[in-house]
Amino acid sequence: MGIDMQINYFGFAASAQIESEVAAQLVRLERFGKAISGCHLAIEAVHEQTLDHPMFDAHLDLVLRTGELIPLEHRQNFDPDIAVRAAFDAAERLLERGFARI
């Protein structure tokens, strides 16, 4: 009973490094596989004129086995891997608080 993963990139090209980080983070959620069937991750490079480097915004949605979509708060960092980890940290905290019993 695996968890499906969909990743969308906006404003920059996908990379093997980010794909690897997402795969590693998804493993953390496998223990909640009875409650969630999938994840949708959107990673956007936000280019602002005042910044030298883009800010990366990671937005993770959980798809429950009931079909319900649970959007999580956006996480931002100048390093896309850190933004992704923060998004999965938030998902894990939510699921650990008993949300997985739905």
Image (spheres, grey):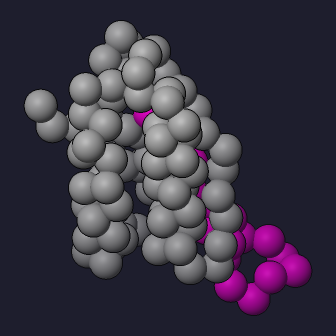
- Considering every residue shown, the one lying at the far right of the view is 50
Q: Quadrant of the C terminus?
A: top left
**Where is residue 66, by image quadrant?**
top left
> For this view, does 75 lie left or right of residue 70?
right
Q: Nearer the viewer, residue 80 or 54?
A: 80
**Residue 22 percent location from the top left of the image:** 34, 61
Q: Nearer the viewer, residue 11 or 27?
A: 27
Q: Residue at x 68, y 85 (%)?
A: 53
18 versus 90 height, above or below: below
> For this view, does 74 lie left or right of residue 97?
right
Q: Residue at x 47, y 74 (%)?
A: 81
Q: Residue at x 25, y 55 (%)?
A: 27
Q: Nearer the viewer, residue 24 or 101?
A: 101
The residue segment tinted magenta is 44-62
Q: Quadrant of the N terminus?
A: top left
> For this view, does 44 lie left or right of residue 46?
left
**Residue 74 percent location from the top left of the image:** 66, 50
Q: Nearer the viewer, residue 6 or 47?
A: 6
24 versus 89 height, above or below: below
